[in-house]
Amino acid sequence: MFYIDLKSRTPIYAQVVDNFKRLIISGALPPDEKVPSVRELARTLTVNPNTVQKAYRELESRGYFYTVLGQGNFIAKPEDDGEVAALLTQLEDAAGELHYRGVGEQEMMARVRAGCEKAAKARSNNEGGERND
């Protein structure tokens, strides 16, 4: 399900966030699915529960999780809360930077298409009952 690299310079909580985002975006974790408790995931990953709690707080603040008191954390349904607009702005900025560095429009478009195809393939695999965890 998760890969945590203890030797990485990336903080462990950020790796937990990245793992959850990858699974949510790919469709491996569908909306309203309950996620492991903080203690359960900390035990599984052999990390401090405070680390997992920090990751869960960040995921909730970014709209990936929601909490039901007394029941735990769940995967949130995607909402357009302005984050899509921010991501599109980042894409435009990245395209401008790549153009400045000599990358052609055709190569950029090919990469965008490849990313879309990869996401669609992951989503269709997950809809077929497979899980990427």
Image (cartoon, rainbow, N blue to C red):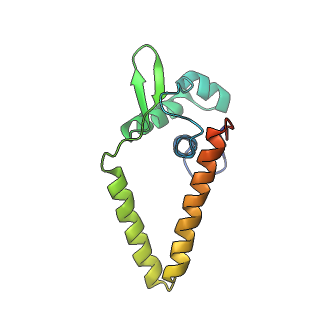
One can see residue 68 in this view:
yes
- In the foreground, 127 or 59: 127
Taking 84 as reference, is 45 left or right?
right
Residue displayed at 47% across by 25% down? 73
Q: Looking at the rendering, in which quadrant would you find the N terminus?
A: top right
- In the foreground, 8 or 107: 107
Taking 59 as reference, is 38 left or right?
right
Indicate the position of residue 65 as horizontal and vertical percent values.
Answer: 44, 33
Taking 50 as reference, is 124 left or right?
right
- In the foreground, 39 or 70: 70
- In the foreground, 86 or 117: 117
Q: Relative to residue 107, is residue 30 depicted above or below?
A: above
Indicate the position of residue 19 as horizontal and vertical percent values.
Answer: 58, 43
Residue displayed at 40% across by 35% down? 60
Residue displayed at 52% across by 24% down? 34
Furthest-left residue in this view: 82
